[in-house]
Image (tube, helix red, strand yellow):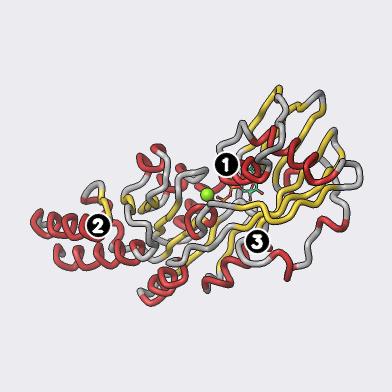
Amino acid sequence: ATPTALMVGIGRGASLGILIKGQDALEASGVIDTVVLDKTGTLTTGEMTVTTVEPAVTVDGDDELLRYAASVERGSEHPIARAIERGAAGLDLLPVDNFETLPGLGASGTVAGHHVLVGSPALLETHNIKPTPQAIAPPEQSGVGRGVVYVAIDGVFAGSIRLSDDIRSSAREAVGALHAQGLRTILLTGDDAPAARAVAADLGIGDVRANVLPADKAGVIAQLQADGRRVAMVGDGINDAAALATADLGLAVVSGTDIALKSADIVLVRDHLGVIPDAIGLARKTRQTIH
Ligand code: ADP
Ligand code: MG
């Protein structure tokens, strides 16, 4: 390897908004054949908004449902938690005991003596709590980038909260550019399949891995590698730090946490997903110059 070509590559990267953390990263990016993309906070903005509140008959209206959910979510760092807190603005929240965060599933706590669970449909399923039929939205209502959170109080379904999460405006073009580079793309998410498929369909991603718990994301990467694929993982660092580190190349988008930045080889500091194909294209060129 000629140091000069690497220096030029790294310098070009910086001007494109790409911070490359070493020559290994640049080398690895040149041979990637598969790009795995995290959904929430990476392909979507992660800045969610509560759109609909549907309390069950056992709960005293929208405000009561939001009050219980937001009280628990105050303890969570997830973008969904922030959205539910904003959705409950103006309501008096209640003190919470025994708060627990359940990575990739939700959160729980005791609110005014009642045990409250807030999280994915899968979370309530594991507790054998069945939603009322109205809570299951027909696909046309769930829409692109939308998710649903279920709430249970004392082991009984208490209602659902729907959220919108906009796809980043640069996502479709970036995915198209990756395909034009001959790369295969996979959408990886802890979300349930309907929300994941809606986003994937909008972006032209055919391969969807939904309901993957944070602890299992690295395993999905390792399995692809065992199948002979050379994998880049793109994430925001919330729940995907291990996957970023496992991949042949880890790319963290700018909003990533410190953990993600440490586990990523390349940090994308421009708030435009076009940096993903740019980074891989640059690495390929640099590699050709070196070899
Ligand atoms: P992604 O893989 O798309 O980044 P996560 O793994 O962070 O998503 O979360 C997966 C799912 O778990 C969410 O879509 C949501 O249903 C549920 N979830 C996780 N954390 C919370 C929370 N604090 N409150 C409610 N639901 C949550
Ligand atoms: Mg995420």
Q: Nearer the viewer, residue 252 or 143?
A: 143
Q: Position of residue 53 (x, y in %)?
A: 76, 51
Which residue has dot 3 on it? 195
Give the residue at x 45% y 45%: 237
Q: Secondary structure at mark 2?
A: helix
Where residue 135 sits, quadrant-wise, is bottom right
Q: Quadrant of the C terminus?
A: bottom left
N-term-proximal mark, 3 vs 1: 1
Q: Is residue 193 above or below residue 59?
A: below
Residue type, label 2: Glu
Q: Which label sits in the foreground, 2 or 1?
A: 1
Asked if residue 125 is positioned above or below residue 143 in the image, the reply reads above
In the displayed structure image, the side of residue 187 where residue 151 appears, left or right: right
Q: Position of residue 36 (x, y in %)?
A: 47, 59
Residue 179 left/right relative to 62? left
Callout 2 environment at 10 Å: few (<14), some (14 to 19), or many (20+)? many
Residue 33 placement, left or right of 71: left
**Does mark 1 have its CB less than 8 Å from ligand 1?**
yes
The structure residue drawn at horizontal position 80% and vertical position 52%, both measured from the top left corner, is: 54
- Can you tell which mark lies on residue 7? none
Secondary structure, mark 3, is helix
The image position of residue 1, as x and y in percent, is 13, 56
Looking at the image, is mark 2 or mark 3 earlier in the sequence?
Answer: 2
- Indicate the amino acid at tag 3: Ala
Disc 2 to disc 1, C-alpha distance: 34 Å
Is disc 3's CB within 8 Å of ligand 1? yes
Density class for disc 1 (Cα within 10 Å; few <14, some 14-19, many ≥20) is: some
Residue designated by label 2: 27
User: What is the CA distance from the residue labelled 3 to the residue labelled 1?
Assistant: 17 Å
**Label 2 close to label 1 by CB (< 8 Å):** no
Location of mark 1 (residue): 78
